[in-house]
Amino acid sequence: MEAQGDGPAEVAPAGGLRGPYVGVASIVCRNGQVLLGERCGSHGADTWALSGGKLQVGESIEACALRELEEETGLRGGHPRLLAVTNDVMTDEGLHFVTIFVEVTGVVGEPEIREPHRCRGWRWCTPKYMPEPLFGPLRGLVERHPEVLHQCCNDSLLDWAAHSRLSPPNLLVRPAA
């Protein structure tokens, strides 16, 4: 795991930043694609992000990744692994997050929209062709360490090929009209 960022956070003159908060993002790859959700109703609305949220007091990073993944998508994962950290100063929103990216393998099920007030839909995407705009922490990961997503997705593709009985991914999950 490698720490990354732009150095110390600058405090905005009009009241400053809130935080820093600890965010945990779950990287779930299947068949060479990564799962992204379109955010709505909170900071980063109308951007694409990994499943994730704030670390709770006393919670381990791995437990947070698994909890957020199940709460948001209904997916259950069994094997979390810490991969990277970003220092995310979002001056437009007055927020400072330190985001920890966790790969979750051994995921069971298909993604569902469990929090429609926070996510419009889930989509499986190749790292090379992800929708825009990306949520700030994910953009930071992609810009500074694109190999993280590529490696996770390549590993999942190799796993899929070795176990060809796996079904192809559902490319887009949206709520029923």
Image: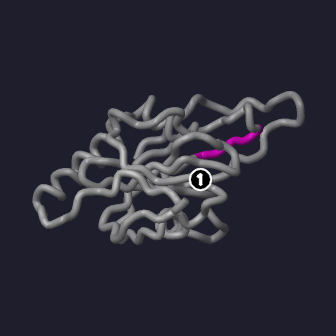
**Horizontal placement of 75 versus 89: left or right?**
left
Report if residue 97 lies within the magenta region.
yes
Residue at screen point 58% across, 37% down = 136
Q: Of residues 17 and 123, which is closer to you in this image?
A: 123
Residue at screen point 59% across, 48% down = 39
Report if residue 84 lies within the magenta region.
no
Within 10 Å of disc 1 (Cα), the crowding (few <14, some 14-19, many 20+) is many
Query: Residue 78's image quarter?
Result: bottom left
Percent x, y of residue 123? 42, 50
Query: Residue 59's image quarter?
Result: bottom right
Residue at screen point 33% across, 33% down = 128
Residue ranking furthest to the right: 14
SS majority, magenta: strand
Percent x, y of residue 41? 69, 51
**Horizontal placement of 69 versus 31: left or right?**
right
**Amino acid found under the numbered disc labelled 1:** Gly
Percent x, y of residue 5? 55, 33
Percent x, y of residue 49? 52, 46
**Horizontal placement of 107 versus 85: left or right?**
left
Residue at screen point 33% across, 57% down = 170
Vertical arrangement, residue 134 with respect to residue 154, above or below: above
Per the image, the residue denoted by label 1 is 23
Can you say which quadrant of the picture contains the C terminus? bottom right
Segment colored magenta: 94-98
Assign a secondary structure to mark 1: strand
